[in-house]
Image (cartoon, rainbow, N blue to C red):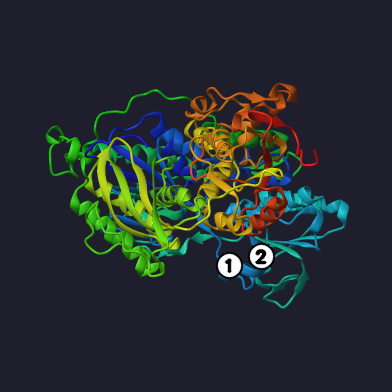
């Protein structure tokens, strides 16, 4: 996370729509100093609607038709928060995220697209497949091997007709003797286009044996039938709904001026009617006095205007007016690399128009997926930022030492907000910090079930903010710190927080701290651990750690592995967290890899430790963190009085994409330190295809899994229990050695030897 000036401002973008991605690229190409850019989105891959029919028909891949928002946000220097929005308080300039989390903004822009209106046709939510949002449509498309009967497409506009033809090709319905029905409310398809265009589309549908039902108002859909208002019942097992969409309910409920259809009313500058610092574009907005149908072409064209006006507003310079065009070229696929072209009264069709559409679509996507490496320094401090601070910029000086502590009011307000949110989520009040807590010293309230046979243990861990979502970072920091207590077989019950906030405006510090503490309190309470104090300071980057106190039985036997049988190594989580996060920082990370890394870091080691200890009390455990699997494994071998360890590379659980990233040469900054002075035997015999796996042995992990050394007789039983408990990638990855020193690698399990 880059350091922010003392009077920085928060520019928050909600949604990764066609207009907003232009904003991200524009700010990446020419950053503004003092602007902290944040993207809030519930998806990491934004689909381009113009390429959906081509994907369904088989001309484009999923990657072709999606924009990687993770990569684009990194290019723009933006924080990325993957979470849905539920409300906005414009008076307090506060965004309410799902789960009750609060996110501050100074300038706001909305472009999160439209959603289906399933209530318009009874049964849609349960039995229909709506085209929007596209991510849900892609998930619900039936597998070609599991077709149950005929198809129905509801919607006779351009999108419905194009989808019907694409589905015909995708599923090869002509060869499967499966009927496809298209239902149109109007007396002709493409009702808003010239009649000549309707006739050409109708001919194309007929060539694909698609039955058109004109003036067909659909009243209800069931699991196998389309029921019309006239009473007709048409059998259809797979029913796609391509009717008019609407804004999400939270958009329609915002305290803003809306059009009759629920879309946000905006001025020609794309600012909302009520608030100069709130902008909206694309499918969530309609311009006052210039209504247009909801088409991607308008959002794409609005993008540069939105980017210019956001920058101009922040710099306090004149804005530009956007006037959506009344006529534009529409290119509609007719199947078989043939397309229909419409502009006003102009109508044409042929392969040329399909290739033109393909060229336009691919060029648009390349603008946002093929990003340059930027070295342009930020511009000077924006004028709008100077309006938000009580002191002139030149009078703001920062102290070091004790003067670097965060303000008491920031800590008080943020902690109060975090506690209130925890209560709303049902967190046990016993594990919340007392009101007015402001000390880094506290007596430890021992749990009621403690006794003289119980002693205390302590552990401390501290990490820098490695992901931009402060709430998730708070959760991960707790789990990372608690892990040492779990692998020792102890129970945590109290913790003190160690917090470093970025040096910036108090409002931004409070927002960040409240998000961090909200996530932290949730995880602490889930593990019956009370926050009893802490210390906050200010620095160039955000950091969070915890000093954790646990209970340990005084008479607890020391783990002692038997020497009479093989000692196996079990790993509870996949490795590759360090390399995936390094790839994200370089803008080369696939969203599914990033999601997998987050899921791994957010998985607690508490239950895994209990499963291992309960089944094998003699087991030795360590958590795999910054030193990587290799060094943590060698430390474990030393504790077990073994000379080394043998690892089975084919058995290593890996994060999605980790091996490919390692093969490409991507490395975490700690890799070379972890790799230094450790000899790996056997690697040269395996060939270069195993080199990436060997490299991943030295990849640092944050909130990594447990590596356990346990008797061979218990290994399979424990692995099965771990997988049943949700650690689905838990594996036996090798064994300790009494004959070979260091690390020996082999391809496959050697249990029988």
Instruction: Name the image quarter holding residue 753.
Output: top right
User: What's the distance in space between the residues labelled 1 and 2, CA to CA?
Assistant: 8 Å
Residue shown at the point (57%, 38%) measured from the top left? 590
Residue shown at the point (80%, 62%) measured from the top left? 150
Q: Any mark on residue 128, and which?
A: 2
Question: Which x, y percent locates residue 185?
Answer: 64, 65
Question: Which x, y percent locates residue 613?
Answer: 58, 56
Residue 475 is left or right of residue 321, and the answer is right
User: Up-down: is 524 above or below 200?
Assistant: below
Instruction: Name the image quarter holding residue 445.
Output: bottom left
User: Up-down: is 253 above or below 664?
Assistant: below
Question: Which x, y percent locates residue 572?
Answer: 60, 48
Contact? badges 1 and 2 (CB < 8 Å): yes
The secondary element bearing badge 2 is classed as strand
Q: Any mark on residue 118, and which?
A: 1
Q: Which of marks 1 and 2 is nearer the N terminus?
A: 1
- The answer, for residue 318, to whether it is visible in the render is no
Q: Nearer the viewer, residue 313 or 374?
A: 374
Name the image quarter holding the N terminus. top left
Q: Which of 718 and 427 is in front in this view?
A: 718
The secondary element bearing badge 1 is classed as helix
Question: Which x, y percent locates residue 487?
Answer: 51, 50
Residue shown at the point (82%, 60%) measured from the top left? 179
Q: Residue furthest bottom?
A: 231
Q: Which of 77 and 288 is in front in this view?
A: 77
- The answer, for residue 641, to whether it is visible in the render is yes
Q: How crowded is mark 2: few (under 14 residues within 10 Å), some or many (20 or more)?
A: many
């Amino acid at each position: 996370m880059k350091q922010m000036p003392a009077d920085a401002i928060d520019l928050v973008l909600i949604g990764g729509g066609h207009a907003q991605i232009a904003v991200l690229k524009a700010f990446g190409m020419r950053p503004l100093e003092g602007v902290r850019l944040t993207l809030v989105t519930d998806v990491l891959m934004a689909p381009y609607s113009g390429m959906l029919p081509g994907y369904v028909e088989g001309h484009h891949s999923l990657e072709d038709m999606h924009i990687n928002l993770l990569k684009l946000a990194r290019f723009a220097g933006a924080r990325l928060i993957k979470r849905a929005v539920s409300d906005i308080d414009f008076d307090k300039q506060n965004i309410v995220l799902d789960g009750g989390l609060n996110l501050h903004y100074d300038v706001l822009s909305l472009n999160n697209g439209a959603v289906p209106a399933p209530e318009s046709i009874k049964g849609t939510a349960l039995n229909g497949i709506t085209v929007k949002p596209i991510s849900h449509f892609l998930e619900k498309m039936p597998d070609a091997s599991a077709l149950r009967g005929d198809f129905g497409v509801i919607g006779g506009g351009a999108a419905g007709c194009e989808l019907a033809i694409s589905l015909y090709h995708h599923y090869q319905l002509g060869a499967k003797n499966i009927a496809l029905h298209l239902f149109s409310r109007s007396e002709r398809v493409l009702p808003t286009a010239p009649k000549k265009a309707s006739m050409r589309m109708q001919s194309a549908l007929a060539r694909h044996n698609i039955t058109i039902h004109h003036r067909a108002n659909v009243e209800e859909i069931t699991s196998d039938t389309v029921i019309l208002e006239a009473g007709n019942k048409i059998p259809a097992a797979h029913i796609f709904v391509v009717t008019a969409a609407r804004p999400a309910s939270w958009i329609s409920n915002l305290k803003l001026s809306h059009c009759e259809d629920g879309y946000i009313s905006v001025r020609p500058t794309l600012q909302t009617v009520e608030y100069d610092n709130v902008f909206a574009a694309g499918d969530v907005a309609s311009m006052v006095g210039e209504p247009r149908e909801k088409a991607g072409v308008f959002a794409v064209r609005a993008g540069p205007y939105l980017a210019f006006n956001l920058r101009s507003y922040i710099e306090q310079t004149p804005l530009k007016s956007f006037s959506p065009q009344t006529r534009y070229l529409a290119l509609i696929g007719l199947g078989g690399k043939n397309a229909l072209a419409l502009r006003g009264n102009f109508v044409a069709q042929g392969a040329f128009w399909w290739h033109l559409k393909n060229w336009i679509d691919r060029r648009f996507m390349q603008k946002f997926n093929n990003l340059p490496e930027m070295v342009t320094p930020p511009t000077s401090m924006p004028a709008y930022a100077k309006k938000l601070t009580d002191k002139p910029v030149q009078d703001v000086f920062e102290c070091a030492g004790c003067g670097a502590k965060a303000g008491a009011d920031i800590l008080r307000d943020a902690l109060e907000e975090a506690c209130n949110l925890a209560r709303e989520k049902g967190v046990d009040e016993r594990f919340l910090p007392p009101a007015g807590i402001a000390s880094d010293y506290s007596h430890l309230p021992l749990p009621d079930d403690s006794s003289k046979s119980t002693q205390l243990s302590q552990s401390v861990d501290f990490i820098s903010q490695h992901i931009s979502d402060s709430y998730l970072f708070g959760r991960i920091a707790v789990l990372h710190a608690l892990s040492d207590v779990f692998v020792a077989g102890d129970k945590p019950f109290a913790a003190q927080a160690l917090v470093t906030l970025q040096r910036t405006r108090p409002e931004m510090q409070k927002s960040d701290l409240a998000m961090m503490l909200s996530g932290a309190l949730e995880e602490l309470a889930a593990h019956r651990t009370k926050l009893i104090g802490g210390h906050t300071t200010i620095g160039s980057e955000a950091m969070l750690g915890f000093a954790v106190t646990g209970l340990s039985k005084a008479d607890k036997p020391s783990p002692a592995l038997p020497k009479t049988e093989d000692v196996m190594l079990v790993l509870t989580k996949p490795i590759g967290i360090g390399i995936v996060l390094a790839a994200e920082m370089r803008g080369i990370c696939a969203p599914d890899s990033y999601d997998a890394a987050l899921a791994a870091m957010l998985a607690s080691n508490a239950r895994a430790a209990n499963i291992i200890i309960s089944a094998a009390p003699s087991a030795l455990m360590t958590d795999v963190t910054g030193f990587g699997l290799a060094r943590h494994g060698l430390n474990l071998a030393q504790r077990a009085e073994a000379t080394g360890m043998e690892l089975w590379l084919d058995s290593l659980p890996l994060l999605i994409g980790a091996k490919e990233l390692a093969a490409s040469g991507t490395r975490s900054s700690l890799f070379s330190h972890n790799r230094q002075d450790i000899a790996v035997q056997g690697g040269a015999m395996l060939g270069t295809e195993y080199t990436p796996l060997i490299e991943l042995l030295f990849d640092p992990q944050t909130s990594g899994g447990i590596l356990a050394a346990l008797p061979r007789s218990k290994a399979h039983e424990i692995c099965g229990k771990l997988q049943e408990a949700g650690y689905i990638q838990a594996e036996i990855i090798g064994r300790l050695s009494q004959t070979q020193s260091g690390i020996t690698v082999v391809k496959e399990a050697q249990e029988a030897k």
